[in-house]
Image (cartoon, rainbow, N blue to C red):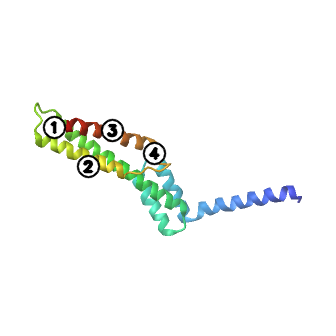
Amino acid sequence: MSNKMFFPTVAIILLFIMGLFFLFNPSYKISIEAKYHYEMGEYKEAYTLAKEAFAIDLYNRMASTIMAQSKISLKYISYIELATKYMKSINEIATHEVISNADKAKIRTICEIMIASYIKLAPSVITDKDLVDKVANYNTKFENLLEKVNQ
């Protein structure tokens, strides 16, 4: 075999062995499944699987990364769920003909809590852009609402 064919052949064989390692190693097999769930937006399932894979092999960087990213995404989803709940509550208050000082204080407190929660969120490069945008939109709404209530 000539030198021109030796190195590409060795490289292909090594890639094949690495592929088999990923397919048959239980930790990486679970990590690949966790990655799939993460990409589908099923962050709880992805987190659970990544945590399981990481417990099997502490050196599994793929599992570690998916676990961290899923945790960040779950925080974003939690913020969205809370923001939706609070916006519904604020909309109920807004339907009253006269908004009392107690209701204004409640709205102010809700807005301050949500703005403080937003500041604590830290997206990563691979956090779903739709989640980040949705959270940013809610934060803008809470900032505008707080500004109106403080007038």
Residue furthest to the top:
97
Q: Amino acid at mark 2?
A: Ile
Mark linked to residue 140? 3
Label 2 with label 3: CB-CB less than 8 Å: no
Question: For mark 4, what is the residue?
Answer: 128
Closer to the camera in the image, 79 or 70: 79
Q: Residue drawn 74% across and 57% down?
A: 12
Q: Based on the displayed image, in which of its 4 quarters is residue 102 positioned?
A: top left
Look at the numbered disc 2 and give the secondary structure of its residue: helix
Q: Amino acid at mark 4?
A: Asp
> Disc 2 to disc 3, how far (Cα)?
13 Å
For label 3, the crowd category at 10 Å Cα-Cα, with few meaning under 14, some 14 to 19 and many 20 or more, is few
> Disc 1 to disc 2, how far (Cα)?
17 Å
Q: Which callout, 2 or 4, points to the residue nearer the camera?
A: 2
Q: Which is more N-terminal, label 3 or label 2?
A: 2
> Disc 1 to disc 4, how far (Cα)?
32 Å
Q: Based on the displayed image, in which of its 4 quarters is residue 143 positioned?
A: top left
Question: For mark 2, what is the residue?
Answer: 113
Q: Which callout, 1 or 2, points to the residue nearer the camera?
A: 2
Look at the numbered disc 1 and give the secondary structure of its residue: helix
> Disc 2 to disc 4, how far (Cα)?
23 Å
Question: For mark 1, what is the residue?
Answer: 93
